[in-house]
Amino acid sequence: MISENRPATGSEEVERRPGRWIALAVLVLAVLLVAVDATVLGLATPYISEDLAPTGTQLLWIGDVYSFVIAGLLVSMGSLGDRIGRKKLLLIGASAFGMVSVLNAYATSPELLILARALLGVAGATLMPSTLALIRNLFHDPRERSLAIGIWGATASAGAALGPVVGGFLLEHFWWGSVFLINLPVMAVLVLVGSKLLPESRNPEPGPWDMTSVVLSLVGMIGVVYAIKEAAAHGPSAGAAGAAVLGALALFLFVRRQLSLPSPLLDMRLFQHRGFSGAVLADLLTILGMAGTVFFLSQFLQLVQGRGPLEAGLAELPAAIGAVVAGLIAGTMARRYSVRAVVSGGLAAIGLALAALTALGQSTGYPVLGVVLLVVGAGAGFAFSVTADVILSSVPKERAGSASAVSETAYELGAALGIALLGSILTGVYRGFPIPADTPPEVAAAAQESLGGAVDVARALPPSQADALVSAAQSAFVDGMQLAAGIGAVVLLVTAVAAWFMLRGQQLEGAAPADEPVKAPAHS
């Protein structure tokens, strides 16, 4: 095997074959779909509320159970890919993702949709670490790999922003389940083309796949996240405390077990590297600060400002443009300046953009929103592309799946926590809005569950009562978004400062002839 410390030579011609870029195009299909699926639901939420009538808590679960399950399984699936083959796991996961999408599309109750979203999370957990790990093995040249990771990151960010556009078009012509059925043709292309073009890669000496570690990881992640969600939504309770204790205990046992296994599911020694740890922490906190506000932005555009689904989706397009442009040049910028300058600068830009949303009002004009979304997209494109490169460059190739899983776990856990914490804060502010005095009790109860519910039940009221109820609900929703955006801004700005110090001295491979990649510590 050629050392990653040496520049590319003629012996690496196999790795430089033209087909690697075609293979990359197949991989980004999977990334695009998972990213679209994570955000398209936000646009469909008002329609789901009207059709399935979920409670406010059920609506939050529909929104974030997908991320919860992915976060709980990513480390296990990344390690499984290292063992059985990343291509094999990717193709199995893509097939399952397509099939489970049908169950999501035709769910007939909130409970069934929550279950279907959870199963979709199981399938989704196989895709993201496999794609990033395959990139690590497809591109040995550091500069080519940075560009490939930039394309991967830009696709993920663009997919998150394009989700509302695609969803908006579908929702204006079909029912809400259509936003899940779009997964089928994309996954079919991925499986058919990927089976022909993608090279297989795995850890040559993987060791056994430890099922005890898998269970501990899943129980720990879901237990802790559930506890935070419940405490944020309903205040401290015995159930939340029990889940927190169970989750924390499971994670403690997971870490202890990994340190004792000769072939751990996750090599905890990787976190001894400041650059690796700093990149992972930056990813987690960035998504945590952004997710709650971004998740509810589609509802703001539709239910507060009265835009149609397609118009609301197009309104979020600047985020995709910013992410694509920034992602493609992030590696070059990090080599020209520094890793910490690009990452911290991107995070600070997102924080300042979220701070601008604290002045958000029902009549805020689109130019303001468009600029904010453009800055958020560009900041995310710079930060996530460079941190992904840092994480992948910090480990040997054979552990690329596990490292990719850590990166994606931080992303998904941040999304779940962001929606749970900031979403619950927004929901708490919303539920406190004053109901007009002449509103029937059953209508008032439904209106305080969610803004979508308020708009729906108001249709049965006389025009004057309906206007008063919807206006009060919209005002409370905006107040909640302002608070969530303010908290998110603080989180992002603090994270920018932390990244500046934690990524000090970190450089991407190929930044200068003397640069050496950060290597994983030797195993004892």
Image (spheres, rainbow, N blue to C red):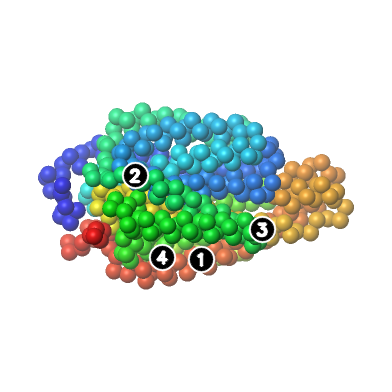
Q: First in sequence, mark 3 or 2: give its number.
A: 2
Q: Residue at x 65, y 60 (%)?
A: 237
Whether residue 295 is situated above or below residue 102 in the rendered picture:
below
Residue 506: quarter of image: bottom left
Measured in 3D between alpha carbons, the distance from the residue under mark 2 to the one under mark 1, in whole angstroms, is 36 Å
Q: Secondary structure at mark 2?
A: loop
Query: Label 3 sits on what residue type?
Result: His
Left or right of residue 355: residue 466: right
Q: How many C-alpha atoms fall within 10 Å of the one at disc 1: few (<14), some, or many (≥20)?
A: many
Q: Which mark is residue 491?
A: 1
Q: Which mark is residue 15?
A: none
Residue annotated with mark 4:
345
Residue annotated with mark 3:
234
Farthest right residue in view? 438
Measured in 3D between alpha carbons, the distance from the residue under mark 1 to the one under mark 4, in whole angstroms, is 14 Å
Measured in 3D between alpha carbons, the distance from the residue under mark 3 to the one under mark 2, in whole angstroms, is 38 Å
Q: First in sequence, mark 2 or 1: give its number.
A: 2
Measured in 3D between alpha carbons, the distance from the residue under mark 4 to the one under mark 2, in whole angstroms, is 40 Å
Give the quadrant of the C terminus: bottom left
Q: First in sequence, mark 3 or 1: give its number.
A: 3
Q: Position of residue 354 (x, y in %)?
A: 54, 62
Camera-near label (3 vs 4) is: 3
The total of numbered circles placed on residues is 4
Q: First in sequence, mark 4 or 2: give its number.
A: 2
Q: Position of residue 13 (x, y in %)?
A: 15, 41
Look at the numbered discs 3 and 4 and tell me whether their residues touch, using CB distance below 8 Å: no
Q: Nearer the viewer, residue 214 or 335?
A: 214
Residue annotated with mark 2:
209
Camera-near label (4 vs 2) is: 2
